[in-house]
Amino acid sequence: MTLSVQGYRRPARWLHWIIAVLVLLMIPAGLIMVQKGLARPVQDALFLFHKNTGVILFGLLVIRVIYRRRHPAPDLPDSLPTWQRQAAHLSHLALYGLLIVMPVSGYVRVRAGGFPIESLDAIGIGTLLPKSDRLADAASAVHQTAAFLLIAIVALHIAAAMQHAVLRRDGIWSRMWPPNG
Ligand code: HEM
C-alpha cells in the first residue's frame, strides 16, 4: 500500500530532478575527460560540456538554496525512525555542501590555471582570479576529493530513495516524484 504524505512543491521537484540529471552527467564526463590517451577532440568536447554545464548547475543550485530557505522541506512522516531522519538530514546537508564546493573548486581550478570558461567569457564575466599554478593545483585536489565524497553520497541517496520507492512504499518517494506532481 502506498501511503499519502505531504510532498515538495512543484518548483522544488523540478529543481531537484534537473540538478540530479545534470550531476549524473557531470560525474562521468569529469571522470572520462581526465583519462590519459583520450582522443583530443573527445577530451575538448567533454571539457567544454563539463565547464559550462557546471556554470549552469551552480546557477540552479543558488536558486535552489534560496527557494529552500523560503520554502522549508515538508515534515517527514512520524513512521520514520529517528536515526533515518537524522541520516537523511545529514546526507542532504552534505549534498548541498558538496554541490557548492564542486563548481567553486572547478571554477578556481580552471581560472587560476589560466583557461577559458566559454559561457562566462561570452557574457563578459572575465576571470576573477590571478593565474597561479599553486592555487590551481590546490583547487584540483579539492575538486577530486569532493568528487569522491559526492559519488559516495549520491550512491547512498539513490539507494535510500529506491528502498522507499520499491521496498517500503511509505510515500517518501512520491514527496519528490513525479516532477510535476
Ligand atoms: C556539480 C558540479 C561538478 C561536478 C559533479 C564535477 C565532477 C567532476 C569529476 C567527477 C571530475 C573528475 C575528478 C578526477 O577523478 O580527477 C572532475 C574534474 C574536473 N572538473 Fe569538475 N565537476 C563539477 C563542476 C565543475 C566546474 C564548474 C568546472 C569549471 C568551470 C569544473 C572543472 C573541472 C576540471 C578542470 C577537472 C579536471 C581536474 C584536474 O584534473 O585538475 N568542474 N569534475
Image (spheres, grey):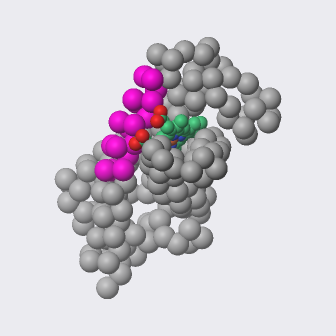
Q: Picture coordinates of residue 93 (x, y %)?
A: 38, 42
Q: Write the residue at 33% across / 70% down.
A: 162
Q: What stretch of residues is rendered in magenta?
A: 137-153
**Residue closest to the far right:** 123
Residue at the extreme bottom of the image, as rendered: 1
Q: Is residue 50 found left or right of 145 in the rendered image?
A: right
In the rendered image of this protein, does residue 66 appear above or below residue 121?
below
* Quadrant containing the N terminus in the rendered view: bottom left
Residue placed most toward the observer, 56 or 35: 35
Compare residues 51 and 75 and report the one nearer the observer: 51
Q: Was residue 31 drawn as part of the magenta stretch in this picture?
A: no
Q: Is 123 positioned to the left or the right of 98 in the image?
A: right
Q: Which residue is drawn at 60% across and 46% down?
A: 40
Q: Position of residue 176 (x, y in %)?
A: 47, 65
Q: With respect to residue 130, does 6 lie above or below?
A: below
**Residue sitting at 50 percent across and 61 percent down?**
8
Lateral position of residue 145 relative to residue 59, left or right? left
Q: Where is residue 9 in the image (x, y as percent from the top left)?
A: 55, 61
Label count reads: 0
Q: Is the magenta stretch mostly helix, strand or loop?
A: helix
Residue 119 seen in the figure:
yes
